[in-house]
Image (cartoon, coloured by chain):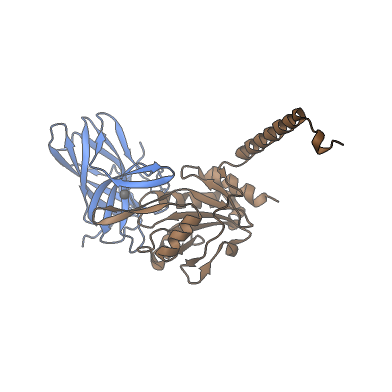
Amino acid sequence: MYSLRTSRSFGLLVSVLLGASAAAQVTVTEPWVRATVPQQKATGAFMQLKAEQSMRLVAGKSPVAGVVEIHEMAMENGMMKMRQIPGIEIPAGQTLALKPGSYHVMLMDLKQQVKDGDTVPITLEFVGLDNKKHTMEIKAPARPLNAMPGKASGHGEHKH
Amino acid sequence: MHLAPTRVSPFLLLIALFFSAAMVGCDSARQAVRFHAADVTGVPYGKDFRLQAVDGGERTLADFRGKVVLLFFGFVQCPDVCPTALTRAVEIKRLLGSDGERFQPIFVTVDPERDTAAILREYMRAFDPGFVALYATPDVTRKTADEFRVHYAKVPTGSSYTMDHTAASYLFDPAGRLRLVASHSASAADVADDVRLLLRER
Ligand SMILES: [Cu+2]
């Protein structure tokens, strides 16, 4: 089993490790994962994505999860629905937010509890206009279950 | 007035009708201003529930008399809506200050297959140990949701499933009557205002 490193100060850094090919094209800022309680099997990862040229986030992988999917939330007649989507378009030059109420990277079939302060590695897979695949590994700090959406949770996350 | 019923002129009737209609209009307008959330006072549904508490025993609305109850239906394996709604409840309680002691959030799972008492207990503890989580058999869960006009459905995703569910929160006055329905997007400040109004009613 992959062991999570606990690093509260890590969030102070821009928490991105750039994969060689995607380095120039995509920037990921403020990634975070919502912590879980024991036996909880699913949670979401949130972040902001910016691409110089149009990119599509199409998949993900993580050592903590058996299954990673790209999800979208939508409100329909007062019902909140969560759906897997084939990908998220990141328009050139714009910042796209994966945040509560819209998109997230869904981590399912969790192999262990994600505790507040843990660092969760996630490999994101993008497809560019050239149809080439780019991967990027990010390290997303876990925020407590009751983290306010959109707000840094007092862990000193890097703010832009 | 000394008009015999047979002698009421149609004109007067019209005037009376006009005024009563205008008053009803004013009344509902006033109510809409009074509360931020939708006022559902007097609706024939949402009367009560009888569900299992995670620490054993059953709970009904009567167990929470004297408090404003905020009732929310959700599930633990939910990355987004449910923690957001419960986090808002934490914030509402904080905003209420000392009134927060008379504010009781209740979380009812619509996923009793996965949300065991043990998980629910841990889940509530992650937000506020004072919050109450309730569960029931799939059958009773469905009946309870129906009683509150809450919809939910199991939707497969990958090798697992997720739950679509009504995202609104229900607010009960200290006498246990369903009064308001707050939408998922309502701010903590607005809901806290409404809770305060319900607590101060007499
Ligand atoms: Cu999801």
Q: Residue furthest front?
A: B6
- Kindly tell me whether residue B106 is visible in this rendering: yes
Instruction: Tell me residue B76's x, y (percent).
Output: 38, 58
Q: Residue furthest bottom?
A: B56
In what quadrant of the picture does the C terminus of chain A appear? top left
Residue A47 vs B130, above or below: the answer is above
In what quadrant of the picture does the N terminus of chain A appear? bottom left
Instruction: Specify the quadrant of the image occupied by residue A89.
Output: top left
Instruction: Tell me residue B74's x, y (percent).
Output: 42, 55
Of residue A41 and residue B180, the one placed in the foreground of this image is B180
Of residue B72 and residue A133, the one placed in the foreground of this image is B72
Q: Colour of chain A?
A: blue
Residue occupying the point 30% across, 44% down: A13
The reply, left or right, for residue B98 in relation to residue B53 is: right
The reply, left or right, for residue A40 in relation to residue A67 is: right
Instruction: Tell me residue A136's x, y (percent).
Output: 19, 43
How many numbered callouts? Answer: 0
Instruction: Tell me residue B153's x, y (percent).
Output: 37, 53
Residue B137 vs A145, above or below: the answer is below
- Kindly tell me whether residue B124 is visible in this rendering: no
Residue occupying the point 63% across, 35% down: B29
Residue occupying the point 28% across, 53% down: B156
Q: Which of the chains is brown?
A: B
Of residue B156 and residue B13, the one placed in the foreground of this image is B13
The reply, left or right, for residue A99 in relation to residue A1 is: right
